[in-house]
Image (cartoon, grey):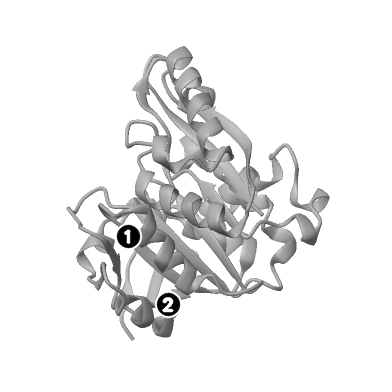
Amino acid sequence: MTVRPPAQAGRFYPGDPGALARQIDGFLAAVERPAAEVSPAEAPKAIIAPHAGTIYSGPIAASAYARLAPRRDVIRRVVLLGPSHRVYLEGLAVPSVDSFRTPLGDIPIDRAACDAVAALPGVVTDDEPHRLEHSLEVHLPFLQRVLGDFALVPIVVGRASATLVDRVLEALWGGEETVVVISSDLSHFHDYATARRIDRETSALIEALDHRHLDGERACGVYPVSGLLHLAQRRGLRAECIDLRNSGDTAGDPDRVVGYGAYVLH
């Protein structure tokens, strides 16, 4: 059994299991609409959530993850897509390992699903894009605390068309047992007021499923986000922004912020 060890524990999130669990649970308890108020019928098929250090983006990510809690006993597989930050990549990459490890434990990889999508054009099996990538890793503790036991299909997305990402998502879409998580922050390094304006515009595009006018300046996860929006258009899904803040609202300098949005798709 091969394992991808945590690369960002102690950097993007607490490395101590107890401290990490308490932090994530605290974020989930503080959301505007807690899980207890969400009916299973309202639980989304897909979410978009940010991937910065948890002190910065964790409260916003928790808004999306709280919506999954009513389906804890139903969801058995998570399809997780995030952008590549450290390795240049054309297309998409799945790992070869059998599990991803966090301080909270090991998450089994759905090897059959990874091997199946690796046979699609534009998808490769390559561990290097996954080795240090934080855009997937920071979501894992949230998933572990909210869902408990599940299998993971982790996919790092490089330069890829919305059609290609749509094709991969369609192959993994499944039924009620599968949820899709797309990892993306929004604007980067503007002052607070400018970021608010840009991020509101970006949110309007996402809610309109308008992937054609998104770009990397608006959302660092533009490729996976665009693919999900392309699929949502085709499948008749609806996107809703449930939280929109930036690092100036949480733990950062308001003169130079990163934007974060939480979105649910039904």
| Residue that protrudes farthest toward the left in the picture | 88
Q: Position of residue 26 (x, y in %)?
A: 64, 45
Secondary structure state at the residue bearing disc 1:
strand
Q: Residue at x 46, y 56 (%)?
A: 16
- Residue underneath mark 2: 109
Is 39 left, or right, of 112 in this rendering?
A: right
Quadrant showing the C terminus: bottom right
Cα gap from disc 2 to disc 1, whole angstroms: 14 Å
Q: Amino acid at mark 1?
A: Val
Q: Which mark is residue 156?
A: 1
Residue name at image x 52 percent, y 39 percent: 206
Q: Residue at x 55, y 61 (%)?
A: 143
Q: Is residue 102 among the parts visible in the rendering?
A: no
Residue 40 location, x and y as percent? 78, 61
Label tally? 2
Q: Is residue 143 above or below residue 123?
A: above
Give the numbered dot on residue 144. none
Point out the frontmost of discs 2 and 1: 1
Question: In the image, what residue type sits under mark 2?
Answer: Ile
Residue, far front = 234
**x%, y% of residue 237?**
63, 53
Out of 155 and 216, give the one closest to the viewer. Answer: 216
Q: Residues within 10 Å of mark 2 (few under 14, many from 20)?
A: many
**11 or 177, which lies in front?**
177
Q: Position of residue 245 (x, y in %)?
A: 54, 28
